[in-house]
């Protein structure tokens, strides 16, 4: 097959672009990915020992208030009514997150009304400088010293492996505080998980493209001879890998945070009673534990699943301990560090990218940006709207 477009990376940005290019513009697309699966870091798989769907690269929860995105994704999957809730362990006690009236009253052993809690936190936050210069000062300005020290300071130090006093205030400027008992993690209009799992969603999307989309997994853009020929021919390319790698690191590496994820199967029905438990103190060294069976309680409670592909074995659960680490080449980049130095380096790569009309950079790696899933899809739809003008 001859191809009109090459897409590098089968994550959400690449998949969305492929589907739109095929079904709206009639393009013939080759999509490659060096991994052996679709979906990038959103990929999940069913654990063979327990039957539990596990998110291979850490928990991914779909939530959005973008109606265009919600309408688009529902073409390829339905969603459960899952609502994400997180808890945190501090000094041997469990508290609800994000910080809300329940967290505040439990921590201070109080029974504050919403107005009383606001006054209390405002008084504690007043000790912060008027213009915070680091994450610690910014955090105290938002929630006061006691709550910051308990729930943010040491968790952040583990997450970034850097003291809060040395981190940018930008990292924490949107720290939420609720003065009611709402402990939903997200505030979006729509929330849920793909009913049949993430992999089924991505396969449905590929199937919707028919024979005008060819997918080649375990294919590296930089090493595959046939792909290199297409590259030399100047084929229109949607590239979702690291932008600095594309330009052979000529301006240096962009810095990332990475993760170590340690999976364990346990012979208990329920290990922690919730999907995600954070650990706010310096010890243990992991930042949180995921227990994946809690993402799909309907599969445990609904007898219709007993004889299905989602049948979970009783008496077993899967947990994953998450450790934060510094990224090195060859490891999976997760979160852009995004220092002033990184932004200056990125600007140099973006200047090169603007000179190449045949390469479109997208996704978290291509744009060096931390995207939620819905924002990745929205960015792909917007970029497609620009691109389709070539064939109009």
Image (cartoon, rainbow, N blue to C red):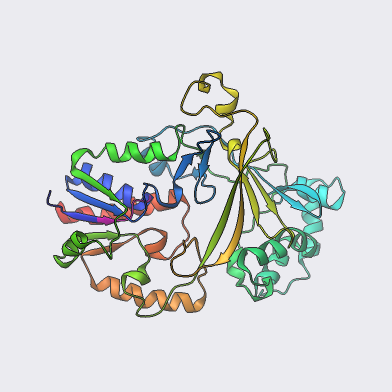
Number of residue marks: 0
Looking at this view, name the residue that lies furthest to the right: 109
Q: Is residue 330 left or right of residue 141?
A: left
Q: Closer to the camera, 95 or 32? A: 32
- Does the magenta portion include 141? no
Q: Closer to the camera, 390 or 62? A: 62
Q: Residue 349: give x, y in percent of width and height.
A: 35, 74
Which residue is found at the position 48% from the left and 70% from the top?
328
Place residue 283 in its image quadrant: bottom right
Q: Which residues are magenta?
A: 7-11
Place residue 242 in its image quadrant: bottom left
Which residue is found at the position 47% from the left and 64% from the top?
331
212 above or below 304? Answer: below
**Does any portion of residue 11 appear in the rendered image?**
yes
207 above or below 380? Answer: above
Q: Residue 7: give x, y in percent of width and height.
A: 26, 55
- Does the magenta portion include 9? yes
Q: Is residue 306 left or right of residue 290?
A: left
Decide whether the magenta segment is chiefly helix, strand or loop.
Answer: loop
Which residue is found at the position 79% from the left and 51% from the top?
104
Q: Residue 235: give x, y in percent of width and height.
A: 17, 61
Q: Is residue 311 left or right of residue 70?
A: right
Q: Is residue 381 left or right of residue 159?
A: left
Q: Residue 2: give x, y in percent of width and height.
A: 12, 51
**Does any portion of residue 98 appear in the rendered image?**
no
Q: Closer to the camera, 365 or 140? A: 365
Which residue is found at the position 63% from the left and 34% from the top?
316
Place residue 344 in its image quadrant: bottom left
């Amino acid at each position: 097959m001859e191809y009109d477009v090459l897409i590098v990376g089968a994550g959400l940005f690449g998949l969305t672009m492929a589907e739109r290019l095929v079904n709206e513009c009639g393009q013939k697309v080759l999509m490659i990915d060096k991994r052996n699966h679709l979906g990038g870091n959103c990929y999940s798989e069913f654990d063979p020992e327990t039957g539990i769907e596990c998110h291979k690269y850490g928990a991914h929860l779909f939530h959005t208030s973008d109606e265009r995105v919600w309408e688009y994704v529902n073409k390829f999957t339905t969603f459960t009514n899952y609502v994400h809730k997180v808890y945190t362990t501090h000094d041997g006690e469990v508290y609800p997150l994000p910080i809300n009236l329940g967290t505040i009253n439990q921590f201070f052993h109080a029974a504050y009304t919403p107005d009383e809690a606001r006054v209390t936190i405002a008084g504690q936050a007043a000790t912060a400088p008027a213009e915070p210069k680091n994450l610690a000062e910014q955090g105290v300005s938002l929630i006061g010293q006691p709550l910051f020290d308990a729930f943010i300071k040491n968790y952040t130090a583990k997450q970034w492996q850097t003291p809060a006093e040395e981190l940018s205030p930008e990292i924490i400027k949107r720290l939420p505080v609720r003065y009611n008992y709402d402990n939903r993690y997200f505030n979006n209009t729509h929330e849920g998980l793909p009913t049949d799992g993430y992999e089924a969603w991505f396969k449905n999307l590929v199937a919707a493209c028919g024979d005008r989309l060819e997918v080649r997994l375990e294919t590296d853009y930089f090493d595959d001879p046939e792909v290199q020929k297409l590259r030399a021919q100047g084929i229109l390319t949607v590239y979702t890998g690291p932008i600095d790698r594309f330009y052979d690191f000529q301006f240096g590496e962009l810095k990332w945070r990475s993760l170590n994820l340690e999976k364990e199967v346990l012979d208990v029905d329920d290990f922690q009673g919730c999907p995600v438990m954070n650990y706010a103190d310096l010890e243990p060294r992991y930042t949180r534990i995921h227990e994946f069976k809690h993402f799909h309680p309907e599969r445990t409670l609904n007898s219709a699943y007993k004889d299905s592909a989602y049948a979970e074995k009783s008496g077993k659960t899967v947990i994953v301990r998450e450790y934060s680490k510094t990224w090195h080449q060859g490891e999976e980049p997760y979160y852009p560090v995004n220092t002033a130095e990184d932004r200056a380096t990125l600007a140099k790569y973006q200047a090169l990218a603007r000179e190449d009309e045949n390469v479109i950079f997208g996704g978290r790696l291509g744009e060096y940006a931390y995207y939620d899933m819905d924002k990745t899809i929205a960015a792909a739809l917007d970029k497609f709207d620009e691109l389709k003008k070539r064939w109009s």
